[in-house]
Image: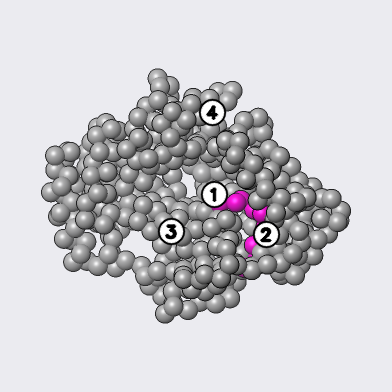
Amino acid sequence: MADRLRPRDAKDVETAVQWALGEGRALELVGHASKRAIGRPAQTDFTLDLSALTGVTLYEPEELVLSAKAGTPLAEIEALVDGKGQQLAFEPMDYGPLLGGAAGRGTIGGALAVNLCGPRRIKAGAARDHFLGFTAVSGRGETFKSGGRVVKNVTGYDLCKLMAGSWGTLAAMTEVTIKTLPKPETEQSVLVRVPKAAEAIDALVTAMGSSCDVSGAAYLPAAIAARIISSTIADAGESLAALRLEGFSPSVAHRKEALKNLLKPFGEIRVLDAPTSRELWRAVRDVAPFAARGEVAERPLWRISTAPNRGAALAAMIAGQGEAQLLYDWAGGLIWLLAERSDDAGAGRIRRATAALGGHATLIRAPAALRAAIDVFEPQEAALAALTRRVKESFDPKGVLNPGRMWAGV
């Protein structure tokens, strides 16, 4: 048998898992493999390729609900809902260029399995908050369903929340149902020239605490701002706090003026029109300045989450006097850190900082040997690790699905 299994439908997926279970084999789950390089290196015998499970099976724009097979490309779904004036409000990022791959290769199943989101998370939540239901095959070789096609579904446990962020370690999803939402009529971005991270994050937090209904809040240090859209957004040496406003044109115009008045004490202000604003936030969403090109591709990349008001202090503790580069999203609550090359990719310093100030860090990009040697995901305390093992054993007692991808032995 070939080392890649390509099921044509959900029944084939069930058969493949049952075969692997009977033969004592482990399976690596992939769609288009756009996020394959995240996590510990595969410890599997075969690849279960779900890319043939594709197609939208239900879309009711009036009900704001869409069902699709798990291997359906996100780009296809986004184009479909855009044609109806709707969007995936969790704004899923595209990991492809960040990991040295092609853009637009992600699937809806992969987006939900890793709980994707973008800058709009501060307003609309992550993928898990728009995940209504699914059909999947567990590591026991059993097909099961959870959830439904409405938001207020109270039948049984909310397994959608458990599957989102499980990275394919519990079950192979074959079909999913998600919520869609209306696309805003327009958007604008307010930029504030603020030279220091702590002051910029104060500005972002102030905006988030206002009634301006901000849907994106990022801090771009000068070097990062220059690499995103240098000719349009930033002059050389200019660090920027960026805030996005979305909605109907009169509302955006009113909130823009209110936000400008609120942020005047922080620095010089300028406003981006809708096309330029979209370009900016697409670059922030996909962390474009740290895409795997040239020298940047050789450096480890971390994704660090913390409380927004601790973002600047945590970054200062980690970066030290080195050559680390930073991009702040979620009003300082999400930090993308391009680390220096070292034996541990800076893991020791990062883990100490998150332990001291609160938060968690994931190593997004590094060579396979390094990902095998250190914790890629945040280490779990004993009680949580025991719970994680029990959940894994409930769904996949023989370790058939993506064993060890998140933590060794799980």
Q: Which residue is mark 3?
A: 90
| Residue 22 image point, x, y percent | 86, 56
Check if mark 1's residue and mark 3's residue have beta carbons within 8 Å.
Answer: no
What's the amino acid at mark 4? Ala
How many other residues sit within 10 Å of disc 3, few (<14), some (14-19) or many (≥20)?
Answer: many
The residue tagged 4 is 347
Describe the element under mark 4 as helix, strand or loop: helix
Residue kind at label 1, given as amino acid type: Gly
State the residue position of label 2: 172
Which residue is labeled 1 in the image? 96
Are the residues flagged by discs 2 and 3 in contact, CB closer than 8 Å? no
Q: Which residues are magenta?
A: 165-177
Nearest the eye: 130 or 30: 130
Residue at (46% x, 60% y) in the render:
129
Estimate the spatial distance between the alpha carbons at disc 4 and disc 2, rounded to whole Å.
31 Å
Q: Secondary structure at mark 3?
A: loop
Spatial CA span between label 1 and label 3 = 18 Å
Query: What's the amino acid at mark 3?
Result: Phe
Task: Work out whether mark 1 precedes mark 4 in sequence or the reverse, and give the earlier one.
Answer: 1
Q: CA distance from mark 4 to mark 3?
A: 29 Å
Dividing the image into 4 quarters, which one contains the C terminus?
A: top right
Which numbered disc, 2 or 3, marks the residue that appears first in the sequence? Answer: 3
Vertical relation: 301 (above or below) 69: above
